[in-house]
Image: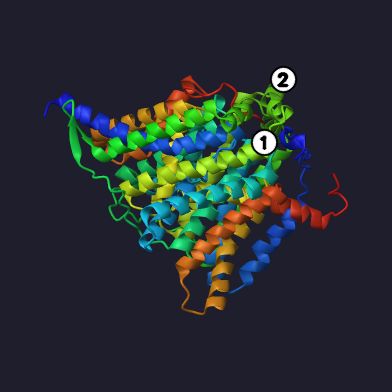
Amino acid sequence: MSSTVLERTTTTARLPRSHGYWGPAVVLAIFALIIPQIHSDYLFDAILTPFLAISLAALGLNLLTGYAGQVSLGSAAFMAVGAFAGYNFLLRVPGLPLLGGFALAGLTAATIGIVFGLPSLRLRGFYLAVSTLATQFFVQWALTNISWFSNDDTSGVISPPAMHIGSLSLESPVRRYLLCLGVVAVLTFLAMRLVSGQTGRSLIAIRDSELAARVLGVKVLRTKLFIFAVSSFYIGVAGALWSFAYLRTVEPDGFDLDRSFEILFVIIIGGLASIRGAFLGAAFIVVLPLLLSRLGATILGPGFDSGLVDLVQKIILGALIIVFLRVEPAGLSALLARLRFPARSEQ
Amino acid sequence: MSAWGFFGEVLVAGLAVGVMYALVAIGFVLIYKTSGVLNFAQGAMLLFAALTFVSLHEKGVSFALALVITLVIMVVLGIAIERFVLRPMAGQPPITLFMVTLGLSYIIEGGAELIWGTQVHGLDLGIEDTPIQIAGVLVSKFDLFCAGVAAVMVILLTVLFRYTRTGLSFRAAAEDQYAALNTGLRLPRIWAAVWATAGVVALVAGLLWGARTGVQFSLSLVVLKSLPVLVLGGFDSIAGAIVGGLIIGATENLAEVYLGSYVGGGIDSWVAYVVALGFLLVRPSGLFGQKLVERV
């Protein structure tokens, strides 16, 4: 074993190129115009809608963890804040339009994000990661125990109000999907602008060396709190979409620690500090269980034990995390880049 | 009963739970101290150990033999993790290594349940959970036993660290990895030994927790209870793990009993974190932690 074992790693990854917008625009066009022609409620309800919500949450976490290097294990808590804030605003403010409710949901999550981001000004690394768990447990407890949040509904399963924009009802699988697509597309565009501008450079500077960033004149404290707020906004809106468009119930149970880990896994598998990584990773995480249970049904016959498949899925997911971190730390995103530009990948 | 007597009992019960947290936290500290890895899979290892022991015992293997077999398995598992998962990752940023152990915990949890099944097992270590009175306060015999085990384990680890060659190399690796390499210490071998030791610690903690709560999946969640303990005590101090465990255990129980009823109960899920967080803001590296935490 050589002594390079202990060498501190310096990030050799290049700064993100300023994004071309043609590729994403084409992808968006396919998703907005061609895919809705498919007549399959299953496709929209069980695959595409959760995929979009998870992508948005992962995008938010990637801004915080991938770009700014602040690890958070509390993403699901912010999703829960977004879902419940959206529900309460739409319930209690008469005449509030749906998208206004989502925006307020995001802003509420952003406010909470700033509060729980304050420790990041003093804590680093593991200590920060552990402190974000406080968010996770506190928020879940508060939403379960304080009945005002769930409008004193004792059943624990709340139906969000019917969704409509103007007089257009959004109560069909395709329309719910298109709603998610629209929200995600706008926020993704803004995120692309954000990371390719000066803020993006500041975030990366803070991630790679806080001291150096400070010396360079980056306002570290302000930038950190700003990205905590932006990240929480994204994750909060994702939570609202998850509850309103996908589950169509608002409940704290779905936003547990496992969901936080799932979002973290999405950005590891998809690629840290990469916008499209969030989407690739989310597609992977959403499709993997479906594939595995299909595979289980094919191999074991129709009467197979679904608990067994869950365990196998867990093991495979864990193994994938390790493999990705070891073989392809930059995730699916880098894999894709190598496939497209074989020559450019030489470092 | 007097208010103070009641307070004493709540406090003692809390301290007893705190000892259990500390037992788990020690496993983290061992690995973090020597290799800088925060091993999230410690809880999964604990589950795996307890489940393996109970299943063997239920299949008719005698208590002692089951213990020995499980011990061997845990040592092998610890060495295998170091050899095949972490050694190839050496030199990566600490946070990457942490995420690796997160993946590892999924594999071990899934594997444990795949091999031994998902049903809940009872575990009887042959120690009664009856209260005895000490200085006017009722204390459970089982809690005393746990405290005894924790004390023995800390003494053994202290002896190991202070008086054996292996322990000396552990300390060297913890102190300065470059210098340790320079003096010819074989870090991979040290790490393997540490992981094996952590496996043994996981077994001890797993058996005690298993006897207390039953051997089931939720055992691996004790890892979440011991994280605030680590934050409070510092990630790299065994003494910190013990003191932190006691503080967290006591605070949690006192808060649940005296404040819980006002806010709807169940606050023990986050009180520990809030205590640890509040403390961190004053002392960012914990009670006994080294100042430099981040190596990135």
Determine the secondary structure under disc 2. helix
Choose between A278 and A175: the one closer to the eye.
A278
Q: Please name the amino acid that badge 2 sits on.
A: Val
Determine the secondary structure under disc 1. helix
Residue extending farthest to the right is A343
Q: Chain of mark 2?
A: A
Q: Horizontal and vertical percent for residue B48?
A: 46, 53
Relative height, residue B109 to residue B34 (above, below): below
Q: Please name the amino acid that badge 1 sits on.
A: Leu
- Tell me the residue that label 2 is attached to: A215
**Front tag of 1 and 2:** 1
- Tell me the residue that label 1 is attached to: B187
Residue extending farthest to the left is B1
Q: Horizontal and vertical percent for residue A213?
A: 70, 25
Choose between A251 and A342: the one closer to the eye.
A342
Q: Is residue A341 left or right of residue B197?
A: right
Decide: few, some or many residues near mark 2? Use Cα within 10 Å; few <14, some 14-19, many ≥20: few
Q: Horizontal and vertical percent for residue B222?
A: 41, 43
Looking at the rendering, in which quadrant would you find the N terminus of chain B?
Answer: top left
Contact between marks 1 and 2 (CB within 8 A): the answer is no
For residue A233, say whether it is visible. no
Q: Is residue B7 left or right of residue A19?
A: left
Q: Marks 1/2: CA distance?
A: 36 Å
Q: Chain of mark 1?
A: B
For residue A162, say whether it is visible. yes
Relative height, residue B92 to residue B67 (above, below): above
Q: Horizontal and vertical percent for residue A89?
A: 41, 45
Q: Is residue B253 left or right of residue A102?
A: left
Relative height, residue B90 to residue A238 (above, below): above
Q: Is residue A240 left or right of residue A55?
A: left
Looking at the rendering, in which quadrant would you find the C terminus of chain B?
Answer: top right
